[in-house]
Amino acid sequence: MKGMNKRLKILLSVLIGFYILFLPVYSMQSDSLSGEEYGLMGEMLRLRQSIINKFGFLSRKQEKDINKILSKYLFIDLSYKNTFIYKGAGNDVRVDRVALTKLLRSLYSEQSKIRLVLCDVLLEEPMDASWGQNPESLGDDAYEEATQKAKAVDAELRQIMDSFQAKNKILLPFEYDVNGSTRTNLIFPEIRSALSQYSSQFNESFYRYSYIIDHYRGIPIVMNDMIRGNKDTSYLGKLFGIGILKGQSFRRAGITLNRITPHFRITNEKIQRDVDYFLAGDFNTELMKGRDSLIVVIGNFENRDIHTTILDKMSGPLLLINLYESLEKGDNFFEWWFILLSLIVYSIIGYVSLDKLTKPKSPETVIPLVKKHFNISRGKKRLPLLSDILSIVWNVIYFAFHYIRYQLKKNWVYWALFLYILISLLLFGHYLYLLASTAGLVLLQFTGNLIKYILKKKSSTVS
């Protein structure tokens, strides 16, 4: 590297900047996930939240933002309105379609206040005629009566869903078998539906999400189109091998990634029963009084539909809403100015690193490890234990002070970058993945320098 000219050094620095910038984005396209990456991401999220909690104006802003988001939604828990369907030797729990029909009818009476109903209930097959009983135990007449009753329930449910569909105000989930390239057969295929699944990865934890899988559009992206009045304008494209969202419904002056690590704004800890969500049996239209353009979310918020995330346990409907909010807030959108700024910062890192390799090493001023020992006495009696404790504390503080000063002086660019990451995490929470990956480089550099520094001090002390 000795004798490298300045132009070559600048070119290599820019290449290093591109490498640092795009490596995390490319790695995000993969399903592989290491424990270190998962742990680092969790720590960055917790650090961000810890800083927000310590500063009143930041925590007040976060609370205000959460309340603003919650004001757009009406969450209804249907898990307490389940029915038992006979399955083999036992019973299988299904959503009570009678209760769902009644709830939807009640909501339709106030449909002018509703922008969209997301019914996060998988309706795969016709209502079972057995109704929790072994069909073999029913006589022919009883079974025929149960069959007609089940058909009537499905017909009523379909009728009310058709009413919402006519207003373009209802969305159902379906699931997709990636390996078999098949999707769930829904009982009402004519009702608008979208992909609802999110694959688990490290430690069976939900971590990354793709808005479009193959040609199937996810619920958040279809919600975005329905609420904004767009007509399936989004589609999957590629930019240097990176999956991006394209179409009229997406932002300009940047790139919109298809796969992201979402930022969870609303968790199960932030919602309360009878305040933010309501049981279906307790629901009445008075809860909608004074509220307009609501997004109604029907599903299970408490027990069966719970997933592990990088932060905490979270219900399926809340996961979908957080993913929709991520799309709305642009968590997967990178403005060109931010990309350019990051490229400049990373290129500076590359230049400084190359500069250290190419410049001849100059002798450094090394501060030796001073082992000061205090002798404390009380009158003529010496206090050895207190003397030892005070000496240890003083030496540790002395070492820490000079090590921090040494690091700030020698690696100022990395600490400046860490500050840049911290500020960006607070102001631009949707850049979490990229910034956390960059923080990994900083922490790795810090750890390496710490080891070198300790070894150097040890060597200096021995000599």
Image (cartoon, grey):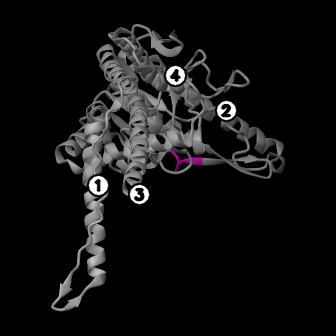
Dot 4: what SS?
Answer: helix
Q: How far from the left and from the top, in percent, is residue 242?
A: 51, 16
Q: Residue beneath label 3, please?
A: 462
User: Which disc number belongs to residue 400?
Assistant: 1
User: Nearer the N terminus, badge 1 or badge 3?
Assistant: 1
Q: Is residue 424 left or right of residue 130?
A: left
Q: Residues within 10 Å of mark 2 (few under 14, many from 20)?
A: some
User: Nearer the N terminus, badge 1 or badge 4?
Assistant: 4
> Which mark lies nearer to you, 4 or 2?
4
In the current view of this chain or complex, which residue is farthest to the front?
Answer: 463
Bounds of the magenta span? 77-82
- Residue shown at 26% from the left, 40% from the top: 408
- Residue shown at 52% from the left, 27% from the top: 28
> Which mark lies nearer to you, 3 or 2?
3
Quadrant where the image shows the N terminus: top left
Instruction: Name the amino acid type tagged 4.
Output: Tyr
Cα distance, mark 1 to mark 4? 38 Å
In this view of the protein, which residue sits in the foreground, 190 or 386?
Answer: 386
Instruction: Name the amino acid type tagged 3.
Output: Val
Q: Are marks 3 and 2 in contact (CB under 8 Å)?
A: no
Cα distance, mark 1 to mark 3? 20 Å
Cα distance, mark 4 to mark 3? 47 Å
Q: Residue beneath label 2, please?
A: 151
Q: Main secondary structure of the magenta part?
A: loop
